[in-house]
Amino acid sequence: MLNARPNGRFSWNYKFFDGDVLVASARKRGFILRSYDVKIGKSRYVLAPGSWFTRKFELLKGSKVIGRIQPEGFLNRRAEILLPTDMPLQIQAYLTWLVVIVWRRQRRSN
């Protein structure tokens, strides 16, 4: 079973478990920012918006964009997920889940 758990009751920082083994964690970079510092094993990434005016998110390793998650169109909820093919499917699902949470919060606040 896969689990995503917040670090605390009021935390927006998450850890991702496969059984009881920590697989990945994400920490929100700031109160207002929509980006996350992501740790997958020993590797570190940033999941951040492509710009302030888009719902597209990019996965960065250092300063290089290695993937993205974006809406398929302007007014629908379908998403195009383009992440590295060597990244485990569970990790891709976790990153997509984080982005969907951000999209949902944005929609509720508008």
Image (tube, rainbow, N blue to C red):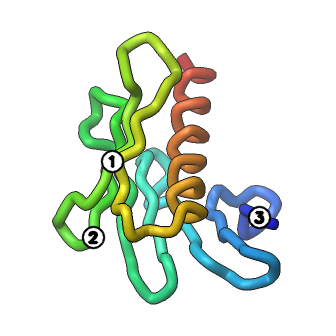
**Disc 1 marks which residue?**
68
Instruction: Give the SS element for disc 2.
Output: strand
Above or below, comparing residue 37 to residue 105 in the picture: below
Asked whether the beta carbons under mark 3 and mark 1 sit within 8 Å of each other, the answer is no
Helix, strand or loop under label 1: strand
Give amino acid for label 1: Arg
Q: Pinpoint residue 15: horizontal percent, then vertical percent.
A: 66, 70
Q: Position of residue 45 (x, y in %)?
A: 37, 70
Q: Given the image, on which type of amino acid does mark 2 rest?
A: Lys
State the SS at label 3.
strand
Q: Nearer the viewer, residue 13 or 98?
A: 98
Q: Residue at x 49, y 25 (%)?
A: 78
Local crowd at mark 2 within 10 Å, few (<14), some, or many (≥20)?
some
| Of residues 38 and 89, the one drawn nearer to the viewer in this rendering | 89
Label 1 Cα neighbours within 10 Å, binned few <14 / some 14-19 / many ≥20:
many
Residue carrying label 3: 3
Q: CA distance from mark 3 to mark 2?
A: 24 Å
Query: Horizontally, is 63 left or right of 81 in the view?
Result: left
Mark number displayed over residue 61: 2
Task: Name which of mark 3 and mark 2 comes first in the sequence.
Answer: 3
